[in-house]
Image (spheres, coloured by chain):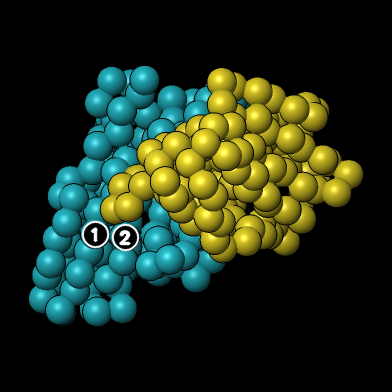
Chain colours: A yellow, B cyan
Amino acid sequence: GEDVEQSLFLSVREGDSSVINCTYTDSSSTYLYWYKQEPGAGLQLLTYIFSNMDMKQDQRLTVLLNKKDKHLSLRIADTQTGDSAIYFCAESQAGANSKLTFGKGITLSVRP
Amino acid sequence: GAVVSQHPSRVICKSGTSVKIECRSLDFQATTMFWYRQFPKQSLMLMATSNEGSKATYEQGVEKDKFLINHASLTLSTLTVTSAHPEDSSFYICSATEGGSTDTQYFGPGTRLTVL
């Protein structure tokens, strides 16, 4: 079955880079997503990558996909205090209309 | 960008009562809406998928008679928690998509339900 794994907590200093990792088990995953959730709020889509891509960069965000190892990472450059939130990776097999399977989420804490 | 709203944002009710949560797509027509449940410090679990004008598809283990979902229009889906109990207390989040295989799911801000 589908399963998405993430570690739970990461603390970084403001200005440093943050790297958040995620592994998934479903080799038929077609789309992989990164979402951000601030306290008491819904989810904000940060970026996504198709499974036929290795890397995608969008301003301060870089997504790396190792399909062989089923490993997804999100690098945030120049991390700011406003980046403090919970980050979820998610996967789906056929785009947004199909079900999203979420990882457990990792809490990113940015200290001044 | 596409905006999804939820109402109410927070509700407290007594055990045994029913609670309705609304999910609206404000600036687009949502052919598909999803309802998720999130327990504290945990991930989102999909409860059901609803398509406008048809019955919702529930995930395994979700009681369809307890969590009634109606997607009567292209901009509104409702989730009714019937005969709520304290174990139903949770954060309920909806998402909506316009359709198409590459379309994005846009999430609402969530509804915090507390059942006393």
The image quadrant where one finds the N terminus of chain B is top left
Q: In which quarter of the image is residue A33?
A: top right
Question: What residue do we see at 43% from left, 66% from top?
Answer: B41
- Image position of A102 with respect to B63: above or below: above
Res B112 label = 1
Residue A91, x across and y down, in percent:
64, 44
Q: Quadrant of residue A30?
A: top right
Q: Which amino acid does label 2 sit on?
A: Phe
Nearest the eye: A79 or B30: A79
Q: Are marks 1 and 2 in contact (CB under 8 Å)?
A: yes
Does residue A45 appear in the picture of this structure? yes
Residue B16, x across and y down, in percent:
15, 78
Residue A87, x across and y down, in percent:
51, 48
Marks 1 and 2, the one that precedes in the sequence: 2
Q: What residue type is labelled 1?
A: Arg
Q: Which chain carries label 2?
A: B
Residue holding disc 2: B91
Query: What is the residue that sits farthest to the right in this orientation?
Result: A68
- Image position of A44 with respect to B27: above or below: below
- Image position of B97 with respect to A111: above or below: above
Res B3 label = none
Q: In this view, does A68 lie to the left or right of B44?
A: right
